[in-house]
Amino acid sequence: MRKIFAGMALICVLMVSGQSVWAAASAETVIKRTTERVLNNPYLLKNPVAVKNIVRGVFNFRKMSRLVLGKNWRRAKRAERKRFTKAFRNLLIRTYSNALSEAAGMVKNIKYSSTRRSSRRTTVHSKVYRRNNSAPVNIDYVMYKRRGKWKVYNVIVEGVSLVTNYRTEFGRDIRRMGMNGLIRKINRKNRGR
Protein backbone atom coordinates (compact mmCIF):
# COMPACT_ATOMS: atom_id res chain seq x y z
CA MET A 1 0.00 0.00 0.00
CA ARG A 2 2.81 2.42 0.90
CA LYS A 3 4.50 1.84 -2.48
CA ILE A 4 1.25 2.52 -4.35
CA PHE A 5 0.63 5.57 -2.17
CA ALA A 6 4.11 6.92 -2.87
CA GLY A 7 3.78 6.32 -6.60
CA MET A 8 0.42 8.00 -6.84
CA ALA A 9 1.51 10.83 -4.56
CA LEU A 10 4.33 11.43 -7.01
CA ILE A 11 1.81 12.05 -9.71
CA CYS A 12 0.32 14.78 -7.49
CA VAL A 13 3.70 16.51 -7.43
CA LEU A 14 3.85 16.41 -11.18
CA MET A 15 0.31 17.69 -11.49
CA VAL A 16 0.77 20.83 -9.45
CA SER A 17 4.36 21.71 -10.29
CA GLY A 18 3.81 24.67 -12.60
CA GLN A 19 1.65 26.60 -10.23
CA SER A 20 3.49 29.92 -10.38
CA VAL A 21 2.90 30.14 -14.12
CA TRP A 22 -0.84 29.85 -13.62
CA ALA A 23 -1.24 31.58 -10.24
CA ALA A 24 -4.41 33.39 -11.37
CA ALA A 25 -5.93 30.20 -12.78
CA SER A 26 -8.23 27.91 -10.88
CA ALA A 27 -6.61 25.13 -8.88
CA GLU A 28 -8.07 22.59 -11.29
CA THR A 29 -6.62 24.40 -14.31
CA VAL A 30 -3.22 24.64 -12.62
CA ILE A 31 -3.19 20.90 -12.01
CA LYS A 32 -4.40 20.00 -15.48
CA ARG A 33 -1.99 22.26 -17.41
CA THR A 34 0.98 21.28 -15.31
CA THR A 35 0.21 17.59 -15.59
CA GLU A 36 0.27 17.83 -19.35
CA ARG A 37 3.51 19.83 -19.32
CA VAL A 38 5.37 17.56 -16.91
CA LEU A 39 4.22 14.16 -18.15
CA ASN A 40 5.46 15.08 -21.61
CA ASN A 41 8.93 16.14 -20.39
CA PRO A 42 11.42 13.23 -20.22
CA TYR A 43 14.01 15.48 -18.52
CA LEU A 44 11.81 15.87 -15.45
CA LEU A 45 11.13 12.15 -15.35
CA LYS A 46 14.84 11.45 -14.79
CA ASN A 47 15.94 14.37 -12.64
CA PRO A 48 15.40 14.34 -8.84
CA VAL A 49 16.81 17.87 -8.56
CA ALA A 50 14.10 19.11 -10.91
CA VAL A 51 11.50 17.38 -8.75
CA LYS A 52 12.94 19.09 -5.67
CA ASN A 53 12.75 22.50 -7.33
CA ILE A 54 9.19 21.87 -8.47
CA VAL A 55 7.92 20.67 -5.12
CA ARG A 56 9.34 23.55 -3.08
CA GLY A 57 7.04 26.13 -4.64
CA VAL A 58 3.89 24.06 -4.66
CA PHE A 59 3.55 22.43 -1.28
CA ASN A 60 3.35 24.25 2.02
CA PHE A 61 5.69 21.94 3.92
CA ARG A 62 5.41 23.92 7.14
CA LYS A 63 1.63 23.56 7.17
CA MET A 64 1.90 19.88 6.24
CA SER A 65 4.45 19.35 9.01
CA ARG A 66 2.18 21.08 11.52
CA LEU A 67 -0.77 18.91 10.47
CA VAL A 68 1.30 15.72 10.46
CA LEU A 69 2.61 16.33 13.98
CA GLY A 70 -0.73 17.52 15.38
CA LYS A 71 -0.45 18.14 19.12
CA ASN A 72 3.25 17.24 18.98
CA TRP A 73 3.86 20.40 16.90
CA ARG A 74 2.76 22.57 19.81
CA ARG A 75 4.92 20.60 22.22
CA ALA A 76 8.03 20.78 20.04
CA LYS A 77 10.64 23.48 20.46
CA ARG A 78 11.13 25.96 17.62
CA ALA A 79 14.44 24.32 16.56
CA GLU A 80 12.79 20.87 16.54
CA ARG A 81 9.95 22.18 14.37
CA LYS A 82 12.43 23.62 11.90
CA ARG A 83 14.53 20.42 11.78
CA PHE A 84 11.42 18.26 11.45
CA THR A 85 10.01 20.37 8.61
CA LYS A 86 13.29 20.14 6.70
CA ALA A 87 13.60 16.37 7.26
CA PHE A 88 9.95 15.75 6.35
CA ARG A 89 10.23 17.87 3.19
CA ASN A 90 13.32 15.91 2.14
CA LEU A 91 11.53 12.62 2.88
CA LEU A 92 8.62 13.55 0.64
CA ILE A 93 10.90 14.77 -2.13
CA ARG A 94 13.02 11.60 -1.93
CA THR A 95 9.90 9.42 -1.97
CA TYR A 96 8.52 11.24 -4.99
CA SER A 97 11.85 11.15 -6.81
CA ASN A 98 12.20 7.40 -6.24
CA ALA A 99 8.64 6.79 -7.40
CA LEU A 100 9.16 8.94 -10.48
CA SER A 101 10.66 6.17 -12.58
CA GLU A 102 7.89 3.78 -11.52
CA ALA A 103 5.18 6.27 -12.54
CA ALA A 104 6.75 7.13 -15.90
CA GLY A 105 4.64 5.86 -18.74
CA MET A 106 1.85 4.58 -16.46
CA VAL A 107 -0.66 7.34 -17.10
CA LYS A 108 -3.09 6.92 -19.98
CA ASN A 109 -5.61 9.65 -19.17
CA ILE A 110 -6.64 11.89 -16.27
CA LYS A 111 -10.10 13.34 -15.58
CA TYR A 112 -10.53 16.30 -13.24
CA SER A 113 -13.21 17.94 -11.13
CA SER A 114 -13.15 20.11 -8.06
CA THR A 115 -15.12 20.91 -4.95
CA ARG A 116 -14.80 24.50 -3.86
CA ARG A 117 -15.15 24.93 -0.11
CA SER A 118 -14.63 28.69 -0.16
CA SER A 119 -12.86 31.30 -2.28
CA ARG A 120 -9.58 30.23 -0.65
CA ARG A 121 -10.03 26.47 -0.18
CA THR A 122 -10.70 23.76 -2.69
CA THR A 123 -10.19 20.09 -3.34
CA VAL A 124 -9.20 19.04 -6.84
CA HIS A 125 -10.29 15.50 -7.62
CA SER A 126 -8.60 13.44 -10.29
CA LYS A 127 -9.13 10.00 -11.70
CA VAL A 128 -5.90 8.64 -13.10
CA TYR A 129 -6.43 5.98 -15.76
CA ARG A 130 -3.43 3.73 -16.27
CA ARG A 131 -2.24 2.07 -19.45
CA ASN A 132 -2.86 -1.43 -18.08
CA ASN A 133 -6.63 -0.71 -18.05
CA SER A 134 -6.91 -1.41 -14.35
CA ALA A 135 -9.36 0.57 -12.25
CA PRO A 136 -8.58 4.30 -12.14
CA VAL A 137 -6.75 5.69 -9.13
CA ASN A 138 -8.51 8.52 -7.29
CA ILE A 139 -6.22 11.32 -6.13
CA ASP A 140 -7.50 14.39 -4.32
CA TYR A 141 -5.41 17.53 -3.76
CA VAL A 142 -6.51 19.62 -0.80
CA MET A 143 -5.41 23.15 -1.59
CA TYR A 144 -5.68 26.70 -0.31
CA LYS A 145 -5.02 30.03 -1.94
CA ARG A 146 -2.50 32.37 -0.37
CA ARG A 147 -1.23 35.56 -1.97
CA GLY A 148 -2.92 34.57 -5.21
CA LYS A 149 -1.21 31.15 -5.42
CA TRP A 150 -2.69 27.72 -4.81
CA LYS A 151 -0.75 25.52 -2.36
CA VAL A 152 -1.22 21.84 -1.61
CA TYR A 153 -1.33 20.87 2.05
CA ASN A 154 -2.71 17.34 1.80
CA VAL A 155 -3.00 14.60 -0.79
CA ILE A 156 -5.54 11.82 -0.55
CA VAL A 157 -4.89 8.71 -2.65
CA GLU A 158 -7.75 6.20 -2.80
CA GLY A 159 -9.16 7.61 0.42
CA VAL A 160 -5.83 7.48 2.29
CA SER A 161 -4.64 10.88 3.48
CA LEU A 162 -0.91 11.57 3.34
CA VAL A 163 -1.22 13.76 6.44
CA THR A 164 -3.22 11.20 8.44
CA ASN A 165 -1.00 8.32 7.34
CA TYR A 166 2.19 10.06 8.49
CA ARG A 167 0.51 11.46 11.64
CA THR A 168 -0.25 7.91 12.80
CA GLU A 169 3.24 6.61 12.02
CA PHE A 170 5.10 9.62 13.46
CA GLY A 171 2.89 9.75 16.56
CA ARG A 172 3.97 6.19 17.41
CA ASP A 173 7.60 7.09 16.74
CA ILE A 174 7.46 10.16 18.97
CA ARG A 175 5.98 8.11 21.83
CA ARG A 176 8.75 5.53 21.42
CA MET A 177 11.81 7.68 20.67
CA GLY A 178 10.85 11.34 21.14
CA MET A 179 10.95 14.16 18.61
CA ASN A 180 14.73 14.07 18.16
CA GLY A 181 14.59 10.31 17.62
CA LEU A 182 11.94 10.76 14.93
CA ILE A 183 14.01 13.42 13.17
CA ARG A 184 17.07 11.14 13.26
CA LYS A 185 14.97 8.26 11.83
CA ILE A 186 13.69 10.42 8.96
CA ASN A 187 17.20 11.72 8.23
CA ARG A 188 18.50 8.11 8.09
CA LYS A 189 15.76 7.27 5.57
CA ASN A 190 16.72 10.34 3.56
CA ARG A 191 20.31 9.09 3.41
CA GLY A 192 19.06 5.71 2.19
CA ARG A 193 19.71 3.77 5.38
Image (tube, helix red, strand yellow):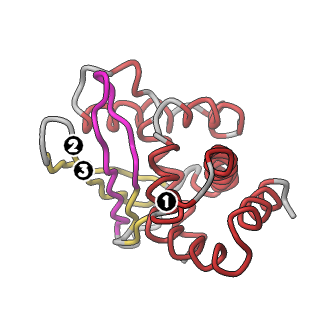
Q: Say which quarter of the image contains residue 188.
A: bottom right
**Label 1 to label 3: alpha-carbon separation:** 16 Å
Label 2: how many Cα within 10 Å (few below 14, some 14–19, many 20+): some
Residue under the image location 52 percent in, 62 percent down? 69
Determine the secondary structure under disc 2. Answer: strand
- The magenta span reads 136-154
Name the residue tied to disc 3.
Answer: 123
Q: Amino acid at mark 1?
A: Met
Q: Is residue 38 left or right of residue 109?
A: right
Magenta segment main secondary structure: strand
Residue under the image location 15 percent in, 50 percent down? 115
Name the residue tied to disc 2.
Answer: 121
Q: Are marks 3 and 2 in contact (CB under 8 Å)?
A: yes
Compared with 134, 88 (above or below) is: above
Earlier sequence position, callout 1 versus callout 3 = 1
Label 1: how many Cα within 10 Å (few below 14, some 14–19, many 20+): many
Q: Are marks 1 and 3 in contact (CB under 8 Å)?
A: no
Determine the secondary structure under disc 3. Answer: strand
Q: Which mark is residue 8?
A: 1
Q: Position of residue 92 (x, y in %)?
A: 61, 52
Q: Which mark is residue 191?
A: none
Label 3: how many Cα within 10 Å (few below 14, some 14–19, many 20+): many
**Label 3 to label 2: alpha-carbon separation:** 7 Å
Q: Is residue 65 left or right of residue 146?
A: right
Residue under the image location 46 percent in, 40 percent down? 60
Earlier sequence position, callout 2 versus callout 1 = 1
